[in-house]
Image (spheres, rainbow, N blue to C red):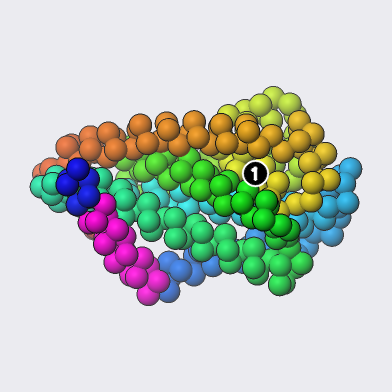
Amino acid sequence: MTNRTNSWRAGLQRGGIELRHLLRNGKEMSGHLTNVAVALLVAAYLGDDVPGTSTPMTHLVLAGFAAYLLFQVGLINLPQILVTEREEGTLLRLRATPGGIPAYLIAKCLLVVVLAVGSLALLLVAGALLVDGPLPHGPGDWLTLLWVTTLGLLAVIPLGAAIGAVLPNPREALALIMLPTMGLLLTSGTVFPSTALPVPVQQVAAVFPLKWMAQGLRSALLPDSARTAEAAGSWELPMVALVLTAWAVLGFLLAVPLLRRAARRESGSRLTARHRKAAQSGAPAA
């Protein structure tokens, strides 16, 4: 019990330090702000309604981008952070620290949660002010926004940590992650109604969490009449909760063992060899 308490305390302290460093890093912060700006620009140029409804397409796209921002922070940003820090020797140092891996994972979860929630809040507030974007209309919608966001992050953050533990290096990580995530962006109903896609594509997208995160956020942000544009003709909130919970459980079962395995495989000779290879290829050493 004491070890778990110490891990939580160390993880929260480390997460707070990393968050302060991030807020002072203008280059990294500008990247997250750019994602929000791109979503607002895309939404601003849409003037039609969602087919079969009176809901503006702008609202559907902003709800979809809200889900994608959460998904992106967990499954793109987090794996890149983990791979980069592994290359710098962070996991090697954690081998000698009791409870180091759990504390490290807690710190990264805190960092990613704050980033994701901050990006989501900024998108919704800026969208409402600049392009008449959607906001929850009542306590029930706010509650749905809260639990879908929480379950969505629980579904993608551990999974992102597991992916980061097995990716080869920072130079290949982005290429390996971006293609499938961009494919999911286009097939999960985030930028246009999923009913416009072939049924087999809808079925594949339904396996992954982004589709359900977007559907859950649409239920919180769009009027109830917009559900007629959904493939099932309803928001399917019980299925949203079930799928996101399943991905959360899977992610947690994979993340800590894979990070521990990655830490066990680290050694001073491996770290030196990676730095030497990076120097020979012209890339800056970590």
Residue 129: say if magenta.
no
Residue 173 rendering spot, x and y as whole percentages: 39, 45
Figure quadrant of the C terminus: bottom left
What residue is drawn where x is 51% and y is 63%?
A: 118
Name the residue beneath numbered marker 1: 216
Q: Quadrant of residue 195?
A: top right
Residue 242 rendering spot, x and y as whole percentages: 56, 31
What residue is drawn where x is 68% and y is 52%?
A: 141
Total numbered labels: 1
- The kind of secondary structure the magenta stretch mainly shows is helix
Figure quadrant of the N terminus: top left
Residue 109 rendering spot, x and y as whole percentages: 37, 51
In the rendered structure, the answer to whether residue 142 lies left or right of residue 150 reads right
Residue 9: say if magenta.
yes
The vertical placement of 208 against 96, above or below, is: above
Q: Which residues are magenta?
A: 8-24
What residue is drawn where x is 83% and y is 45%?
A: 225
In the rendered structure, the answer to whether residue 128 lies left or right of residue 83 reads right
Q: Is residue 151 visible?
A: yes
Q: Nearer the viewer, residue 152 or 166?
A: 152
The vertical placement of 35 against 267, above or below, is: below
Residue 80 rendering spot, x and y as whole percentages: 38, 50
In the rendered structure, the answer to whether residue 67 lies left or right of residue 60 reads left
Q: Quadrant of residue 66?
A: bottom right
Which secondary structure lies at badge 1?
Answer: helix
Amino acid type, label 1: Gly
**Would you call the spot at circle 1 few (<14 residues within 10 Å), some (14-19), or many (20 or more)?**
many
What residue is drawn where x is 69% and y is 30%?
A: 202
